Image: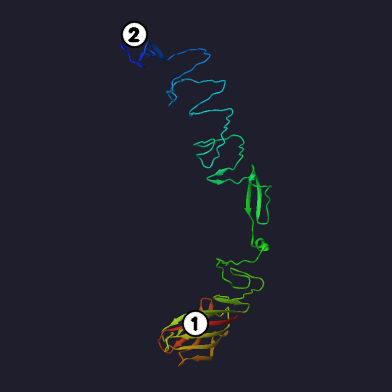
Amino acid sequence: MAILNFPVNPTLGQTHVIGTTTYSWNGSAWVIQSKVATFNSTTIQSLIITTTTNAISVSNGGALTVAGGAAIAGDLFIGGSANFSTSSFLSLNVTGTTESNSTNTGALVVTGGIGIGGNLYIGGTLFSQGAPVLTTASFNNTPQDGTDIDIVDVGGGILEFNNISTLQSVTTRGASSNRQITLTNSTISTGTNSGALVVTGGIASNNNVSARSYNLQYGNISSTIQTVSTTSATIIDSFFFSQYRSAKYIVQISEGSSLTDRSQTSELLAVAFNTGTSSLVEYASVFSTTDLGSFDTLMNNIGTDTVVNLYFISNDSVPKTIKIIKTLITP
């Protein structure tokens, strides 16, 4: 054995390598522990490899490394994990019954995407981004369109759902609501057929109705407010001669809320004539201590129209809040 350089006085289990063969000392003799064999072609009835080294790559296969392909006509049992760089299967049957509740659970878990060239049958629920996908299988019966929904078959097994609801279709099923209704349309009303809301019939209200002004068939009712703190003649209201010919005013004047602050209410009638002049009469006036001022009207040309201005001439420069409710009558 000295020629083969076997160790002198070996210990139990000590190994010695000669070429591709590894020997192990069993206490009384050197026995072959493992040997790397290279075959160009061979047939073996049964091959048992007892080495337990795990595979870590295609070039370091552990107990068995095959540089080329491998054909197995029978069953293949793998006790550990199976890793594939790329694979093709005529049929793959996964018999595990683990339910999937995320992208990392289930009998089959795929880290990347899946491309399927044929049909896909699912016995459970199909999820996308954590939400169940609505399919035709989700319906007990074939979906039918209705009053507010139009269903169109666009082909390819795809259904298109269109909302065709109108105020008429909605209110036909029920026109009562306890919700506040707000119209954001800002169209000004200039007659009974214009504005953000047009009502052909009448309107009933069991409570207050608030508005800046009301257009009537032959007139208008509105209210305004402003402050006057000068003795100069100040315009406190105007209307166009082309739209209205006469006005009735209820004017409230207030200097404040203390015991010494004065107040007054006056009722005025104004009329504009085709001659370009106007006339005003104050036929009623009530005040706390003294008359706070006087009123007058004057017509002025503005562009192609003529405006009728209502003036207030205060008896002093004490600031006064003037509120007006006026009724206008068309020509």
Against 245, residue 146 (above or below) is: above
Q: Which residue is mark 2?
A: 4
Secondary structure at badge 2 equals helix
Q: CA distance from mark 1 to mark 2?
A: 126 Å
Q: Quadrant of residue 178?
A: bottom right
Q: Residue furthest bottom?
A: 289
Q: Nearer the viewer, residue 52 or 203?
A: 52
**Residue at point 40% right, 12% down?**
31
Please tell me how crowded label 2 is: few (under 14), some (14-19), or many (20+) other residues with Cα within 10 Å: few
| Position above or below: 216 against 182 | below
Label annotation for residue 69: none
The image position of residue 51, as x and y in percent, is 44, 20
The three-letter amino acid code for the residue at tag 2 is Leu
Q: Kindly identify the amino acid type of the residue bearing the numbered disc 1.
A: Lys
- In depth, the one of 155 and 114 nearer the eye is 114
- Which residue ends up furthest to the left in the rendered image? 8
Q: Is residue 215 left or right of residue 309?
A: right
Image spot of residue 56 (x, y percent): 43, 26
- Residue at mark 1: 323
